[in-house]
């Protein structure tokens, strides 16, 4: 072992519920500026322009909003099998799906419910569609980008009742590395940040309702892109929840806003690189406000509203 791509590579995709698929599709395609790569019945598939795989966002028509599932990219069938054995070894039941069985473009997927109540897909071999640029002498970006046009998905922020438990599961079973944690005065973990891709986080957990969904974040390249994103939100009448601002935890910068269904989105930039042998950063409960929003130093109650 030890080859590049061992284990989980990164966050791959989220499957989000929307009551009005056409409205949500218009928003994600024209305001967020994701690329639509497919439609089948009650689902639409989208990706950031620089992603090569078929989708990083699935919109599923449903009576409610919220998160159906999230997926992580695995480098090979051998690694998927190895991780599936670790999940089974932790006492969880997992279902296995052949390529195209779960979604038309999906690869081989191992699906299980995590102790946090979230449905998780480990996937290898999703159909590749390319990033829209030629592989020979490409320009820096496609000429037809619209809206915010983030290049790729970045992270997902979830809630559950027992953050200590899910953090242990992600670290010990799925081999994530803890980058940051917010500790309560009694020592338990209020929030944790975990990575596989060497960024500050692929996924984060905050204490809250089991199976809860706080936001999905797409990457933008720089702080000025957050201003342009806020301009796009204002132009299109999209409700801005917070930012542009700076986080203490992750040292990233972000802007939060809502899709038409009520799912919270973020565009995120900054942060740092995390090596596997780096030590995690700890925040105390009294500094939690600054860990979330550096400048205001406090978290508005509206920002804590979540959906499960
Ligand atoms: Fe975030």
Image (tube, grey):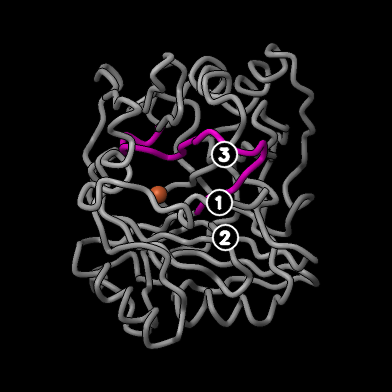
Sequence-wise, which precedes: disc 3 or disc 2?
2
The residue carrying mark 1 is 13
Most distant residue in the bottom direction: 235
Q: Separation of disc 1 and disc 2 at Cα?
A: 5 Å
Q: Is the CB–ligand 1 distance for label 1 below 8 Å?
A: no
Q: Residues within 10 Å of mark 1 (few under 14, many from 20)?
A: many
- Residue at screen point 42% across, 29% down: 192
Percent coordinates x, y for residue 129 in the rendering: 52, 63
Q: Is the CB–ligand 1 distance for label 2 below 8 Å?
A: no
The answer to whether 155 is drawn above or below residue 178 in the figure is below
Q: Residues within 10 Å of mark 3 (few under 14, many from 20)?
A: many
Evaluate if marks 1 and 2 touch, with contact meaning CB atoms under 8 Å apart.
yes
Magenta segment boundaries in residue numbering: 194-215
Q: Position of 2 compared to 22: left or right? A: left
Q: Residues within 10 Å of mark 2 (few under 14, many from 20)?
A: many
The residue carrying mark 3 is 159
Percent coordinates x, y for residue 1 in the rendering: 44, 15
The residue carrying mark 2 is 57
- Residue at screen point 27% across, 64% down: 244
Q: Position of 302 compared to 291: left or right? A: right
């Amino acid at each position: 072992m030890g080859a590049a791509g061992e284990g989980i590579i990164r966050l791959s995709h989220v499957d989000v519920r929307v009551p009005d698929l056409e409205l949500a599709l218009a928003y994600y395609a024209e305001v967020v500026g994701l690329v639509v790569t497919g439609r089948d019945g009650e689902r639409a598939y989208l990706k950031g322009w620089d992603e090569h795989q078929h989708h990083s966002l699935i919109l599923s028509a449903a009576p409610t909003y919220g998160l159906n599932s999230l997926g992580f990219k695995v480098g090979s069938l051998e690694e998927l099998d190895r991780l599936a054995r670790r999940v089974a070894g932790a006492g969880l039941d997992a279902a296995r799906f052949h390529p195209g069985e779960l979604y038309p473009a999906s690869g081989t997927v191992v699906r299980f419910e995590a102790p946090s109540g979230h449905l998780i897909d480990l996937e290898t071999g999703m159909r590749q569609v390319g990033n829209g640029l030629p592989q020979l002498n490409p320009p820096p970006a496609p000429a037809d980008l619209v809206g915010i046009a983030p290049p790729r998905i970045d992270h997902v922020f979830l809630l559950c009742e027992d953050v200590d438990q899910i953090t242990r599961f992600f670290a010990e079973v799925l081999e994530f590395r803890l980058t940051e944690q917010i500790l309560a005065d009694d020592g338990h973990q209020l929030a944790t940040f975990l990575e596989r891709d060497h960024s500050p986080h692929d996924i984060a957990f905050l204490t809250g309702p089991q199976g809860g969904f706080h936001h999905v974040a797409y990457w933008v390249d720089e702080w000025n892109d957050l201003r342009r994103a806020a301009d796009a939100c204002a132009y299109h009448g999209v409700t801005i929840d917070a930012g542009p601002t700076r986080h203490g935890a992750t040292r990233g910068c972000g802007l939060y806003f809502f899709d038409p269904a009520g799912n919270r989105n973020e565009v995120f930039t900054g942060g740092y690189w995390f090596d596997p042998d780096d030590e995690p950063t700890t925040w105390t409960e009294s500094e939690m406000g600054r860990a979330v929003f550096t400048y205001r130093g406090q978290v508005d109650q509206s920002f804590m509203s979540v959906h499960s």
